[in-house]
């Protein structure tokens, strides 16, 4: 296509030249020191154009000749720059190929070449990438002293840089936090993650690292908050998210040292959404001698047993067994309704039977306790407690032989 265009232009020039110069009878007279020369106007125009083109060629040749040293320097600098980039690519390939010693050497070579290349001498991002590759290789080689030295140089470079943060700065801090976690230094990891910009700190990888660091630093509330953010980002499946949140809530509850702290924690956790978390809180309240608080937290779930899954009903029932001491009379209708609705579930039967025994309603408690004591699906501690309640009932009836038999049955449970 380009050849066709040039051919058309050549024809146009030929037509224009034939039209304008063919009938041109003008003369140009040149006089110099007694010499006189007459030229046709057409020849004069051709000579002027030719002289102009020749002068331009001479100037271009001189410019090329004079700029030869500068262009040679640019070529050498370009060669160094290409060699530095090639060394960086080699370091990446070796790193991902698990040749960490070669990757570290290639990154060091790229760093040396970058210092010699004018285009890369002031490129802090290139140097930071080289340092990160070298530090990553040293980490894999378990050379922690050199790794920390190289990483500190990279972090110092990131802190010294002015202007908005770049992705390489975030990469340096995230890698440093990940390596701190692998070294089991959770406080150091949290410190590095706190230094991240707000946008970077909300990324999924940063939140995952923060979750691990918070759990390692024994900060269950911080870990729970981070896990909720990850769940909102759909970083886990719904089932895994629910299990993780439940586990972290339990860790936070177990860390409460007094009743006041436990009450504040329960208010923050909003236990009304999870029966098993409420059961865990009730068990901790029992350990802190706050039985009324335990029953208060369990009451909404006990009243709505029909809306709970079987494992949730079992958790609530076992927690109520632990909190049965001083059971008030207004619980009796709830207990009877639960026994009628869920009389086939051993945990509910055991909870109702022991609550009746606590209220010394031995006639109602006997059958339920016998049923609970004979249920292999119940925890061993619950079955032992049921046998001991039956022993207490036998002594109330002055049946010492039956009481001894029940005590033996309780002791025989592993």
Image (cartoon, rainbow, N blue to C red):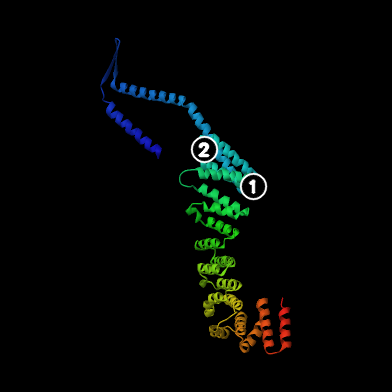
Residue 270 image offset from top left, x and y in percent? 51, 69
Tell which of 109 and 268 is nearer to you: 268
| Disc 2 secondary structure class | helix
Q: Is residue 15 above or below residue 160?
A: above
Of pointers 2 and 1, the one earlier in the residue sequence? 2
* Residue 305 pos. (x, y %): 54, 79
Quarter of the image where one finds residue 332:
bottom right
Could you say which quadrant of the image residue 254 lies in? bottom right
| Nearest to the observer: residue 243 or residue 214 | 214
Look at mark 1 in the image and give the residue it sits on.
144
Q: Is residue 402 visible?
A: yes
Q: In the image, what residue occupies the spot 57% across and 50% down?
A: 176
Which mark is on residue 120?
A: 2
Q: Residue at x 69, y 87 (%)?
A: 395
- Which label lies toward us, 2 or 1? 1
Could you classify mark 2 by the number of other residues whose Cα lies within 10 Å: few (under 14), some (14-19), or many (20 or more)?
many
Tell me the quadrant of the picture where the C terminus can be found. Answer: bottom right
């Amino acid at each position: 296509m380009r050849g066709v265009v040039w051919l058309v232009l050549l024809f146009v020039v030929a037509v224009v030249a034939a039209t304008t110069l063919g009938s041109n009878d003008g003369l140009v007279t040149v006089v110099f020191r007694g010499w006189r020369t007459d030229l046709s106007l057409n020849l004069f125009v051709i000579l002027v154009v030719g002289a102009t083109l020749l002068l331009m060629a001479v100037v271009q040749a001189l410019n090329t000749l004079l700029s030869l040293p500068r262009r040679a320097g640019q070529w050498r600098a370009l060669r160094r720059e290409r060699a530095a980039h090639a060394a960086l690519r080699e370091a990446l390939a070796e790193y991902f190929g698990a040749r960490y010693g070669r990757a570290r050497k290639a990154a060091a070579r790229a760093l040396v070449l970058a210092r010699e290349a004018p285009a890369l001498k002031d490129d802090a991002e290139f140097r930071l990438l080289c340092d990160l590759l070298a530090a990553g290789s040293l980490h894999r080689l378990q050379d922690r002293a050199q790794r920390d030295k190289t990483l500190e140089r990279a972090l110092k470079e990131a802190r010294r840089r002015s202007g908005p943060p770049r992705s390489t700065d975030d990469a340096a801090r995230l890698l440093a936090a990940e390596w701190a976690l692998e070294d089991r230094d959770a406080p150091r990891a949290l410190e590095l993650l706190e230094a991240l910009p707000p946008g970077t700190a909300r990324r999924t990888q940063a939140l995952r690292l923060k979750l691990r660091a918070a759990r390692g630093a024994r900060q269950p509330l911080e870990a729970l908050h981070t896990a909720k953010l990850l769940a909102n980002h759909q970083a886990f499946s719904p089932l895994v998210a629910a299990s993780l949140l439940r586990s972290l809530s339990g860790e936070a509850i177990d860390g409460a040292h007094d009743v006041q702290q436990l009450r504040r924690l329960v208010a923050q956790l909003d236990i009304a959404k999870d029966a098993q978390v409420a059961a865990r809180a009730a068990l901790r309240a029992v350990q802190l001698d706050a039985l009324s608080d335990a029953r208060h937290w369990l009451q909404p779930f006990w009243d709505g047993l029909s809306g709970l899954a079987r494992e949730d009903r079992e958790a609530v029932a076992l927690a109520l067994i632990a909190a049965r001491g001083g059971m008030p009379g207004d619980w009796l209708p709830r207990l009877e309704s639960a026994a009628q609705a869920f009389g086939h579930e051993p945990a509910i039967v055991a909870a109702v039977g022991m609550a009746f025994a606590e209220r010394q309603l031995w006639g109602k408690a006997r059958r339920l306790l016998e049923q609970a004591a004979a249920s292999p699906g119940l925890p061993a501690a619950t079955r032992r407690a049921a046998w001991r309640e039956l022993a207490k009932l036998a002594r109330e009836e002055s049946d010492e032989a039956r009481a001894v038999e029940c005590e033996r049955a309780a002791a025989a449970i592993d």
